[in-house]
Image (cartoon, rainbow, N blue to C red):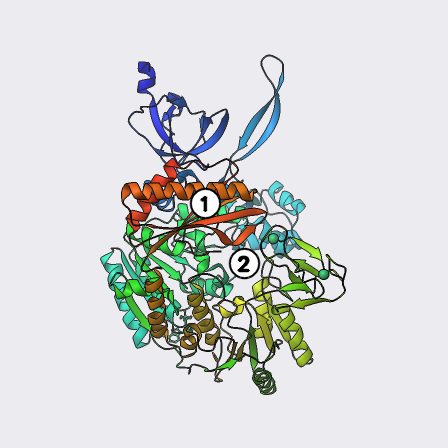
Amino acid sequence: MTPEQNAAKIIEVAVPLPLDATFHYSVPDTLAHRASIGVRVLIPFGRRKITGYVVGTPAASAEEVREIVDVFDEEPLFTEKELAFFRWSAAYYFHPLGEVIKAALPAGINLTSRKRNVVAADGTLVQEEVLTGGRPVKRETFYRAVAAAGPPPKLRGTMLRLHEYLCRVEEAPATQLRREFAATAVHFRRLLDLGLVAAAEREVYRDPFREEVFVHDLPLALNVHQAAALEHLSAAVARGAFAPFLLHGVTGSGKTEVYLQAIARVLEKGGTALVLVPEIALTPQLVKRFKSRFTSGIAVLHSGLSDGERYDEWRRIRRREVTIVIGARSALFAPLTNLGIIVVDEEHESSYKQSEGFRYNARDLALVRGKMEGAVVVLGSATPLVTTYHAVQQGKIGYLQLPERVRSLPMPTTELLDSRGRKSATFLPELVAAMGDNLANGGQTLLFLNRRGFATYLVCEECGTVLSCPNCSVTLTYHRRRERHFCHYCDYSIPAPSVCPKCDSPSIALLGRGTERVEEEVRELYPDAGIGRMDRDTTSGRGGHSRVLKGLENGTVDILVGTQMIAKGHDFPGVTLVGVISADATLNIPDFRSSERTFQLISQVIGRAGRGDMPGRVLIQTLNPGHYAITRAVAHDFTGFYQDETAFRAEAGYPPFAYLAALIFSGNSAQEVDKGATAAAGLLQRLKGEARSRVEILGPVSSPLAMIRGRYRRQILLKSGQRPELHRLVARFRKQLKLPAVVRMAIDIDPLDML
Ligand code: ADP
Ligand code: ZN
Ligand code: ZN
């Protein structure tokens, strides 16, 4: 190395590629002052040029380093504190730091590249890559009135109204004036020419809630349980140190009110708040409650935002114009400074776990971020995770309970209907009778079935062929309205055949039922009733949820059929009957969490009944009337369920008594995947022997879904009573593993979905 190179500034760069390393580069003097931690740089990488993130400024580098080409950002995109969090997450989930950072930043910020032809110095035509920085910000023209020199000219019509209005207000954006006064470019130009108004262009945010007006409300007087919970939270907020809590209370017990008041304490101290909710619970009603309570800036992050809107919200947060962020999973990475509280509502929801790419769990990382920031973390749920409640028992998480509903409504009466040996009708007679009674009394009914579509499979009664997906190991679901059979994993579909595709026999049967069939059968039973359906098929598109729920609110829907969507978070005061078509669908999923999920779902469904002034009734059809997940849910007995479930988990060695990591191997060739997974298992066994580790290595086995989207899958499950031991083994394994290029491996730490 020459002395000049020695003196150059060195930076550590993370790249958004599946690589387990960061890289050193030197910075030319002209760029040195801008290449600080948190900015993006353009770097030569192999024979390409790519974008990377500056994550360190080491004093020197032992490696031979290349020089960066450019610096993209004037200001850092992340702080060193956020970087520490990204680093922790990358290490914990064994995911490349550059990809973690990319996932944490809003998509709208990413540079887009396009190719363009340029004439090189030697006269030949070459392709050059042009990078354009991020999404353009939105600008808008604002008008304001100014005093004209000389006597005021006579104005009439639109011009007059516009001018009068602008004299009254400070200034107004062009879009508003166009809308309210039917003003056009001609009007604006005349007023400008006359010297009556001035125009200024400014950056504006795309705010999806801009148009709405919120009526300000005040904190409610808390009941004794809420007050006790708030007292503990306020004390923790006052201490200003990391403090995790479980807020255990059924829907309607006043958890949200407690969050609101705890957040108020944080804001008073000058802190900020992060509220995570499952996507499905991120309704306008929830946002409205926050916007009505707080006059300070609130950002809302959900999947319905365009990249531009998301980027705008992100910039508002970064510029500290926001003190509260409400959002789904990825909002965990919101760049709030001085974070005082993180709320994870419905902490048991599996949607907090990202199932592809960077497989993080926002509920778990909320505790990590809270610890790093010295914040209070509140996990709220009516049916907490078994692992969370275990941590409470161990004294690691504080316990706050709201044991009753705010308006002391009685819990609904619940009956189990044993479907064993009683023909495979959709409704047992008891449920039909109850629906009829409820309809006659003017009550609303919810019918729950956790499967969408009409029929779950088509089978040929002649040759036994079952219609299944050519890309995935699942049957195709028949959707009647669209007259097609769909794969729910890859969206492959075919038109509904009238004869068996294999033997041409016309005796084909549609078996199994989904929400679409239930809806149809209810229509046949009650042709005059208002009937609606709520599942992924009827709620797609913006505002899909509210569209369906509107019918329940305004009373045009008497019976609503739906998947788990109807089980969650909504408050329907008119619902006096809930029917569970089959409680067994989730119970039979081959996953150690199936009992827990079933308990949670049934508990939630039960919670939907009798939220208004009328008492509620719940009927549950099941083939497993003795299963503890069902009996404990029916008895509203969380602790009983916890005991049964922990007994099973302790015996079988599952969380909270063991930590898990899944290694998923996939590829287009079953043979290669099999070979790769077997070799990987061999390496694991060898490393385990060398380290005298007690990690259990299970597999490789075929994944329960052996093929998804045309890719074969095999998996290895690692189990250990100690997290560090598990982590060390995976780290060593990952360094030494050599897989053929056609086989991909994903590491899933604390896997939730074992399919
Ligand atoms: P959760 O989040 O547990 O479902 P909420 O906070 O949404 O409960 O409360 C349920 C309902 O009760 C809401 O309509 C809320 O406004 C009302 N509520 C909550 N706390 C009180 C209180 N202390 N006094 C009166 N009404 C309350
Ligand atoms: Zn056939
Ligand atoms: Zn498929």
Image quadrant where residue 64 sits: top left
The CB of the residue at mark 2 lies under 8 Å from ligand 1: no
Say which element carries label 2.
loop
Residue 453 horizontal/vertical position (percent): 63, 64
The CB of the residue at mark 1 lies under 8 Å from ligand 3: no
591 or 338: nearer the viewer: 591
Residue receiving disc 1: 746
Taking the spot 40% from the left edge, 45% from the top edge, the residue there is 318
Image: 498 above or below 252: above
Image quadrant where residue 636 sits: bottom left
In-image side of 426 versus 47 (left or right): right
Q: Which amino acid, mark 2?
A: Glu
How far is the residue under mark 1 from the one under mark 2?
Answer: 44 Å
In-image side of 290 versus 463 (left or right): left
Residue 23 horizontal/vertical position (percent): 38, 30
Residue receiving disc 2: 211
In-image side of 215 versus 384 (left or right): right
Q: Which amino acid, mark 1?
A: Ala
Residue 209 horizontal/vertical position (percent): 52, 57
Image: 691 above or below 590: above
